[in-house]
Amino acid sequence: MKHVLKIMALLVAISAFWIGLLETSVVPRSYAWLLPIYLIVSLGCYGLLMVGIGLMLFPTCPQEAVLLQKDIAEAKEFLKNKGVDVGSD
Amino acid sequence: MEDNGLGILISAISLSIFSYYTFWVIILPFVDEDHFIHKYFLPREFAILIPVLGGVALLSFLCLFIGVVILKSKYETS
């Protein structure tokens, strides 16, 4: 419940700032009207950018992959010797 | 597809969308009407229309998806 109240307080503060910006013409009127949509679009772009950067910097650990394949082969050998059906290869 | 290449593609798309939109909304009103650059940008009403339409489409898709999942689970338990 408290989290929702925090978020709503933040929204009220942002809309008060925006209405204040509209009324006291600090910036030209057309800019003040477009500001919320611009902020939402840039927020979406920022999210996409973070996703892209995370994908770019994702580590693949090639040595670990080789070790894992070796482990899998060992386990398959062991189980086959014990008589378990290890399926296709 | 390679994770690396996909990450680079997504970052490039997001950066280009951001710069195009920033240019459209903020810089273009200061440019004279005769400048050739106006040919590459739609009229400014579309700067509001396209994000709003995209947002409405996204919200309706989400609601549809949630509704389908709920109905499917009810159909399977009944």
Image: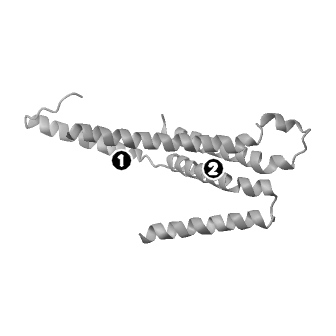
Asked if labels 2 and 1 share a chain, the reply is yes
| Circle on res. A37 | none
Picture residue at 62% right of the left edge, 53% below the top: A40
Q: Position of residue A36 (x, y in %)?
A: 66, 56
Q: Which residue is mark 2?
A: A41
Residue B8 can be seen in this image: no
* Quadrant where the C terminus of chain A is found in the figure: top left
Distance between the alpha carbons at the discs numbered 2 and 1: 40 Å
Q: B32 or A55, which lies in front? A: B32
Q: Amino acid at mark 2?
A: Val
Secondary structure at badge 1 equals helix
Residue in the image at 45% along x and 68% along y: A3
Front-most of residues A77 and B28: B28
- Residue, disc 1: A64
Residue drawn 80% across the image and 61% down it:
A27
Residue A53 visible to an observer of this rendering: yes
Judge whether B1 appears above or below A24 on screen. above
Three-letter code, disc 1: Glu
* Residue B23 in the image, given as x and y percentages of width and height: 76, 47
In the rendered view, would you say A15 is above or below A40? below
First in sequence: mark 2 or mark 1?
2
The reply to whether callout 2 and callout 1 are in contact (CB within 8 Å) is no
Residue A50 point in image, percent of width and height: 55, 52
User: Which quarter of the picture shows residue B72?
Assistant: top left
Judging from the image, what secondary structure is the residue with disc 2 in? helix
Q: Residues within 10 Å of mark 1 (few under 14, many from 20)?
A: few
Q: Indicate left or right for A73 with B43 as reference.
A: left
B3 vs A24: above or below: above
